[in-house]
Structures are given as C-alpha cells and as structure tokens.
Amino acid sequence: MSSNQLVVAKFGGTSVADYSAMSRCADIVLSNPNTRVVVVSASSGVTNLLVELTSANVNDERRLSLLKQVAQIQYRIIDELGRPQDIAAQIDKLLSRMSVLSESLVLDRSKALMDELLSMGEQCSSVLFAAVIREKGSASSAFDVRQVLRTDSHFGRAEPQIEQIANLSGDFLQPLLANQVIVTQGFIGADEQGRTTTLGRGGSDYSAALLAEALSAHAVEIWTDVAGIYTTDPRLAPNARPIAEISFNEAAEMATFGAKVLHPATILPAVRQKIQVFVGSSKDPEAGGTWIRHQVEDTPVYRAVALRRDQTLLNLHSLQMLHAQGFLAETFATLARHKISVDLITTSEVNVSLTLDKTGSDSSGQGLLSESLLQELSQHCRVRVEDKLALVAIIGNKIASTAGICSRVFQVLEKHNVRMICQGASPHNLCVLVDEAEAAQVVLALHQNLFE
C-alpha cells in the first residue's frame, strides 16, 4: 500500500451494534486493501447508558442495572465469537473499570472522571471489532487512540492539538499499518497528562478525519445507516434522492444546518488537507453513497434542503445601540466567555437577534443558556428567549447572486410564520427560522418546489 492511498474508515454505533453488524463491516474493510485504519463508535445504545451512569441522580440499583446492560451488549458479541478467553478478559477488565468509575462519580462529580467513563464504549467496541477481523483471517489489533489523539483539557468537549496529533501518529501509528488493520476509538483523546478527554457527542467522524489528516490519507469513509447524503431527509420528503458528489463547502453547510449524516466538524480536518470523504451505508455497501470533494463538476443552484430542530432565538433590545459603538462586541465577548457560538444573526438599529444551536452542547448534553449568562446579558440590554423553533436551510451554489431565488422561496413560505431570514453571508445557503411544529411541512413544500 502506497502511503498516499491510505483509507481511514469510520463505523458508527449502528454499524457495530452487534456481531452480525460488525461482521458486515469487517467485510467492507477487507474488501479494500488500502483500508488500514478503522475508527469505531461505541455499540448502539452503549453511549446513552454511559451518559445516564454519569448523571447525578442515579441510585445504586439503577447503576448496577445500567452496568449490566452495557455488559450484555459486549457479551452477546463475545459469545458469537466463541468466547475467546483473551478477548473476554480484556472486556472484563474494561467493565470492571466502568464499575469503579461509576462508583467514584457518586462522591467526585469531576468532568475528567465522566470523560473516562464515557470513553469505555469505544474501548470495548474496538477490541471486539479487531477480533472479528482476525476471525476472518486477517491481521488486526486494537490501538489505544489516546496515544496519538492529543487534546487540551476541556473535558466534555476537548480541542484537538493538530500538530501533536500528526507527530504522535507518525511515531506510533504509521509504523503499525504495513501489515495489519488497526482498529481504534472515535470520540476520545487524551490531554498532556494522559487523562482521557472526549470530543463532544458525534465526535467519532471528527476523530476519523483528524487521523486521516495526521496520516495524510487519500480518503475517509464514513459508514453509517444511510446510503449517502440526500437532497433532504427522506422521512420528510419521500422523493428525496441521493447526491452522488458534493463540494466541501456545500457539505459543510449541510452538516452545519442539520444534515444528520455528518458531524459539522468532521469536514474541517479533511478540508484542510483536501482529503475526499465518502459517506455510505454499512447495511448496503452496494448502494453506493456520496463523495465529498474539494471541487466537483456539477454545481447546481439548489443542492439540498436541511432542517435543524431545537433552535433557540435570543432577542436583545437596547436603546444604547442607537448610533453607538461596542454593543455587539460586548455581546459576543459575553457569549464567548460562556463558550457559546452564535449561529445566525440579524440586526436592526436597536435589536439584535441571534440563534444558538443546542446540538453544540457538550458530551454530557448540558444546555446552553445558563442563568449566569442571561443575567450578564441583562445588565446591558433587554433579553427575550424563544424556543421550539427550527431552522430550514436551502443549500446550493451562487444563491446570493442568482436572481429570482427569493421570490420562489417566499412563494412557498407565504402560509407560514417566518421568524428570521438569513441570506447573503454565504453563497451556499439561504436560511429561515420557523416554528418547530411547521418545520416538516416547510421542508416538504420547499423540496417539492425546488427538486421535484
């Protein structure tokens, strides 16, 4: 395998849910000799059980029940493998560590302990997946990603240290790839002190892209339960169709605006190195999928309609804004101190409206708008918070400079109450904020008008 043909493949929770799913995915890996690094999520359901284990109000009985459920998921796979003793011993060691950590959390509610506990699902599935590949007659071993995926110490949502990841991967990971498939964990890393950190929920795609960047891979394959990226969610518009290839810019917009197939940050490391990304279904690898490339042949005005639910609108009103400087700077500084990123923004002379994306909360699922943040904002303006909103984004190319788009879109929207419109900041999108209750109808109507 020449180094520039290296493929990093990532398998999500449903793809490694049980033995038969793992077996299908192992076949996908082995069908391409260039696939040398495999990044796995925790088996389906495990992360949710672990998240519940980290919550403050778990009593002893519930704790034991949760640990038992996690163990059962692992043991069903071990049984199908014929109970190899070495694998059972590795899993038992991880399960007993889980138990110790969950007990420690009763007295010590530290985020560092939570992150270590949340990392256990991926540690288990990587050991099991490597065993499934070996069972098929190919050399494979599980590799602890914490040796190379260096992050800062912001537990729950750690920031990767790109240069260090590249250096460590060159030293510890690259040399192993010549004669075996390496299976490693998504979603987790370690800080300078070697303490386990997590990259926030949905971080496995990100891990795969970070490793691909560090190893100068040729491609990243994201294997999930859908055959690529569609013109919209097929559950909302039955005539949605798969997109064969899409540019990085469009895909980044789609991911940012709620297309569930990809985690928004996934794209960044791949974009930096112009590494192409493939999204396909592990249940149906023959169905093809979507290639995300730096540049694509076809650039239609309309590419897709994306939906992001659970949006919060923050309305800030202040007469001090009138012909004054510094109000926005102060507002953004306050939000930055609380580690909140603003999504969309519209301003008038005395009002600023901002949307915040709740999907950006950390891996414990903590909410964004704390009392202390609202109090701080209230000191220099009147604050109104609205929720139960949804963002609908039309993704495409040259949207800002194509005549007639607005009239076409607003014709579709005339029966709906639109809370906010954002257009012009990017040539790739036009966004509207609507009531969550109407969001599905809006998406269907737009899809029918623009694509069918």
Image (cartoon, rainbow, N blue to C red):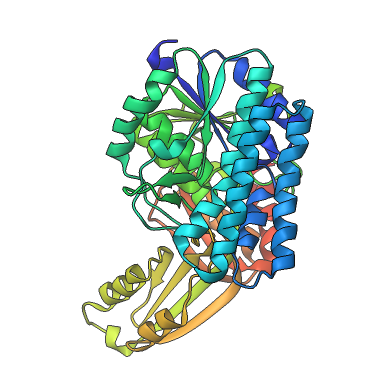
Q: Horizontal and vertical percent for residue 71?
A: 71, 46
Against 128, residue 286 (above or below) is above
User: What residue is rendered at 63% in x and 18% in y?
Assistant: 134
User: What residue is rendered at 55% in x and 65% in y?
Assistant: 105
Q: Is residue 53 left or right of residue 153?
A: right
Q: Point out the residue furthest to the top here.
A: 1
Q: Hey, which quadrant is residue 218 in on the image?
A: top left
Q: Is residue 305 visible?
A: no
Q: Horizontal and vertical percent for residue 182?
A: 51, 24
Q: Is residue 263 left or right of residue 16?
A: left
User: What residue is rendered at 53% in x and 67% in y?
Assistant: 366
Q: Horizontal and vertical percent for residue 289?
A: 62, 29
In this view, the residue in front, 431 or 99, is 99
In this view, the residue in front, 198 or 377, is 198
Image quarter of the C terminus: top right
Against 336, residue 423 (above or below) is above
Q: Hey, which quadrant is residue 392 in on the image?
A: bottom right
Against 23, residue 1 (above or below) is above
Q: Horizontal and vertical percent for residue 312?
A: 53, 71
Against 243, residue 363 (above or below) is below
User: What residue is rendered at 40% in x and 46% in y?
Assistant: 190
In this view, the residue in front, 191 or 440, is 191
Q: Point out the residue furthest to the left here.
A: 325
How many numbered badges does the structure rendering display? 0
Q: Is residue 57 visible?
A: yes
Image quarter of the N terminus: top left
Q: Is residue 304 left or right of residue 112?
A: right
